[in-house]
């Protein structure tokens, strides 16, 4: 009986140590991402929902210095409407694999591509530009339908 309690205490101790290590590692990654961040454009390739935790995730790819990176983030509820769309991606300059996609910051198709090493600041897209782009897209779509 005493051996059983000791074994349980050791297992519990290792489990808690593992949780602490994972938490510290996650905090270091998040801090580095925020401290040494650059921005680029990523394209969503797939979306999903994990049944256990109820988390939604999006898988995306992006390029930094002409190298392709693939990552996924769990962020909000988004459906198939975001597939193949482009969004801002924040990445760590010295470790581009450490990234986060911003699904609320869609990049219009007319927007110029980022430099290969990324932007230092998020480029601004004015409301007028977005409205003009949508109107132009609607005109092109209407013209294509009428042909």
Image (cartoon, rainbow, N blue to C red):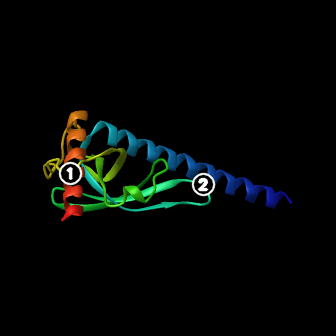
Q: Which mark is residue 139?
A: 1
Closer to viewer: mark 1 or mark 2: 1
- Tell me if label 1 and label 2 are in contact, CB under 8 Å: no
Residue 114 in percent (x, y) is at 16, 49
State the CA–CA distance, disc 1 to disc 2.
Answer: 43 Å
Label 1 sits on a secondary structure element that is helix
**Horizontal relation, residue 96 to residue 49: left or right:** left
Residue 66 in percent (x, y) is at 16, 60
Residue sitting at the far right = 1
Q: Is residue 99 above or below residue 48?
A: above
Q: Residue at x 23, y 57 (%)?
A: 141
- Point out the image quarter for the C terminus: bottom left
Q: Is residue 75 above or below residue 44?
A: above
Q: Would residue 63 be seen by someone viewing this image from the given angle?
A: no
The 10 Å Cα crowd at callout 1, few under 14, some 14 to 19, many 20 or more, is few
The 10 Å Cα crowd at callout 2, few under 14, some 14 to 19, many 20 or more, is few
Q: Earlier in the sequence, mark 1 or mark 2?
A: 2
Query: Which residue is the site of mark 2?
Result: 53
Q: Would residue 108 be seen by someone viewing this image from the given angle?
A: yes
Q: Quadrant of residue 60?
A: bottom left
Residue 40 in percent (x, y) is at 23, 48
Residue 131 in percent (x, y) is at 25, 39
Number of numbered labels in the structure image: 2
Q: Residue at x 14, y 53 (%)?
A: 116
**Horizontal relation, residue 142 to residue 47: left or right:** left
Label 2 sits on a secondary structure element that is loop
Give 145 or 27, whichever is nearer the viewer: 145
Q: Is residue 6 above or below residue 127?
A: below
């Amino acid at each position: 009986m005493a051996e059983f309690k000791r074994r349980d205490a050791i297992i519990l101790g290792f489990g808690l140590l593992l949780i602490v290590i994972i938490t510290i590692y996650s905090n270091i990654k998040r801090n580095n991402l925020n401290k040494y961040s650059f921005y680029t454009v990523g394209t969503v390739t797939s979306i999903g929902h994990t049944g256990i935790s109820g988390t939604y995730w999006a898988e995306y790819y992006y390029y930094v210095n002409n190298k392709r990176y693939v990552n996924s983030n769990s962020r909000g509820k988004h459906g198939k409407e975001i597939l193949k769309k482009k969004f801002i991606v924040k990445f760590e300059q010295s470790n581009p694999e450490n990234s986060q996609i911003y699904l609320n910051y869609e990049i219009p198709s007319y927007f110029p591509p980022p430099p290969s090493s990324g932007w230092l600041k998020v480029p601004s897209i004015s409301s007028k530009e977005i409205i003009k782009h949508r109107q132009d897209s609607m005109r092109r779509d209407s013209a294509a339908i009428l042909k």
